Image (tube, grey):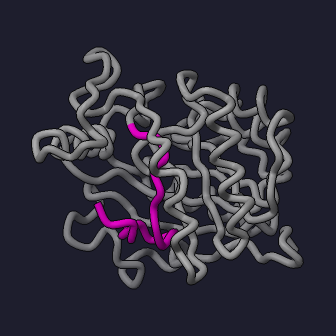
């Protein structure tokens, strides 16, 4: 697989682990699980370990790839890197020592900006104090429904230079969302087979809250149930949602 990414808010992906298990409703139509099944059938070496069929699937068993740790060391030009687009670095079966090795690589390549996203916010909070946090690491949690709001409180306790939320797929309104200590929010609907609809008002409420709190907002897409052909075309979004901003940094920390 190419390291270049089609994800709108990043430039490249790096997968020192692959595979995962469903933990919440946002996982129900996981693109990575579907892709792993296809990659296994194609013979891709990284995707031959099957996961538990109740929570995972073919080619999607949690697997660490020590040989992938050095990949970013070969990237000379600076790039923004989404870490583990095909996994979750804070999965319970990723040893803490291995997580430390990933962080050591990120620290050794300060020319890059790393975006780490997890649904395992509790483990993230529990181990955050046992990791060294370089200033080029952005840490985020997925918040797809009001049930997952406690993940935001966990994230607030993490000493990352940038803390962000991924509200994608947004499956309901987020009343009570507190953006104190949060630098960036990504908002998006769901696409692909079985996509669940996103109410435009849910997204507008989050973007309005970002404006009020001075938090950068990035509306990635509105979901294929909104418009299958144009759900990623920002020019077609309602005016209030034509927003794709990034956190403003100063000396490696949010301005």
Instruction: Give the quadrant of residue 152.
Output: top right
Predominant secondary structure, magenta span: loop
- 227 above or below 168? below
Residue 46 falls left or right of residue 189: left
Q: Is residue 149 magenta?
A: no
- 72 above or below 164? below
The answer to whether residue 196 is visible is no
Instruction: Give the quadrant of residue 212.
Output: bottom right
Instruction: Report the residue at 33% width, 48% height from top.
Output: 197
Instruction: Report the residue at 40% width, 65% height from top.
Output: 221
Outermost residue, left side: 41
Using the image as rendered, state which of residue 255 and residue 83 is in the foreground. 83
Q: Is residue 17 magenta?
A: yes
Instruction: Report the residue at 21% width, 64% height from top.
Output: 228
Using the image as rendered, state which of residue 204 and residue 250 is in the foreground. 250
What is the x, y in percent for residue 249? 80, 76
Q: Quadrant of the C terminus?
A: bottom right
- Image: magenta residue range: 1-18
Instruction: Report the residue at 83% width, 33% height from top.
Output: 130
């Amino acid at each position: 697989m190419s390291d270049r990414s089609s994800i709108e808010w990043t430039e490249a992906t790096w997968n020192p682990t692959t595979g995962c298990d469903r933990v919440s409703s946002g996982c129900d139509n996981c693109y990575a699980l579907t892709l792993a099944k296809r990659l296994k059938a194609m013979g891709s070496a990284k995707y031959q370990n099957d996961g538990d069929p109740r929570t995972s699937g073919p080619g999607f068993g949690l697997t660490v790839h020590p040989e992938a740790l050095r990949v970013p060391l070969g990237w000379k030009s600076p790039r923004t890197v989404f870490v583990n687009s095909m996994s979750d670095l804070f999965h319970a079966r990723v040893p803490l020592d291995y997580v430390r090795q990933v962080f050591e690589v990120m620290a050794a390549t300060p020319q890059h900006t790393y975006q780490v996203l997890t649904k395992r916010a509790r483990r993230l909070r529990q181990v955050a104090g046992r990791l060294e946090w370089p200033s080029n690491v952005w840490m985020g949690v997925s918040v797809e429904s009001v049930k997952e709001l406690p993940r935001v409180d966990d994230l607030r306790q993490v000493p990352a230079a940038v803390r962000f939320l991924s509200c994608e797929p947004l499956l309901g309104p987020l009343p009570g969302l507190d953006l104190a200590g949060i630098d960036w929010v990504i908002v998006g609907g769901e696409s692909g087979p079985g996509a669940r609809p996103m109410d435009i008002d849910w997204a507008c409420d989050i973007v309005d809250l970002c404006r009020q709190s001075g938090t950068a907002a990035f509306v990635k897409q509105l979901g294929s149930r909104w418009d299958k052909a144009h759900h990623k075309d920002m020019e077609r979004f309602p005016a209030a949602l034509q927003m794709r901003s990034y956190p403003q940094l100063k000396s490696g920390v949010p301005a």
